[in-house]
Amino acid sequence: MNPLDETKIDQALDFVSLNDIASDEVLGKEIGGIDLSGGQWQKLAIARSVYRNRALLVLDEPTSNLDPLMETEIFQHYLTMANDKTVIYVTHRISMAALAQRIIVIKDGEIIQDGSHDDLIKNEGEYKRLYQEQAKWYVR
C-alpha cells in the first residue's frame, strides 16, 4: 500500500471546499465520527477521485447534491483533468452534458444518439428535445 500524500489530500479537499475537515478526521456517525451532509459526502467522493488521478473516471450524477455554482466549478475542473483521461459522466442535466466532447444518449437501455452537442442539436432527436425542454426553465 502506498503512503498517503498529505499535500495531495489537502489540495483535493481544498478543491471541493472541504478544507475545514482534517484529513485524519473520522467520518460517519455510525463509527463515532462526524456526520456529513449529502452534498459533503458527494464532495468527498469527488475529492477522492481528484486525489487518485486515474486514467479512467466514471462519474454517475456526481454533483446532484451540490449547488449550481459548485457543480459548474467541479465540472470545469473535470474538463481540465480530462485532457489525458477518459471521463464517463452520467447525467440528466443537459447543460452539463453539452460541455462534453462526445455525448451518448441512452433511452430505455438503448443508445439512440451519439455525437457532439452541436451535432445532436442539429438533429431532430431526443437530445434536442431534452435540451429544449430543460432550457425552458432558464429562458423566461
Image (cartoon, helix red, strand yellow):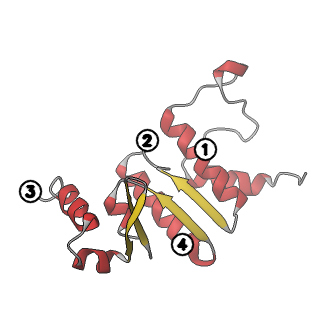
Helix, strand or loop at disc 4?
Answer: helix
Q: Earlier in the sequence, mark 2 or mark 4?
A: 2
Which residue in the protein does label 4 denote? Answer: 80
Q: Earlier in the sequence, mark 3 or mark 2?
A: 2
Q: Residue furthest left?
A: 140
Q: Is residue 18 visible?
A: no
Helix, strand or loop at disc 2?
Answer: loop
Which residue in the protein does label 3 denote? Answer: 140
- Label 3 to label 2, Cα distance in Å? 25 Å
Mark 1 and mark 4 residues within 8 Å of each other at the beta carbon:
no
- Residue at 42% x, 55% y: name it: 91
- Label 1 to label 4, Cα distance in Å? 19 Å
Q: Earlier in the sequence, mark 4 or mark 3?
A: 4
Mark number, residue 121: none
Q: Residue 120 placed where, x, y %?
A: 30, 75
Indicate left or right for 37 with 52 as reference: left
Q: Earlier in the sequence, mark 3 or mark 1?
A: 1
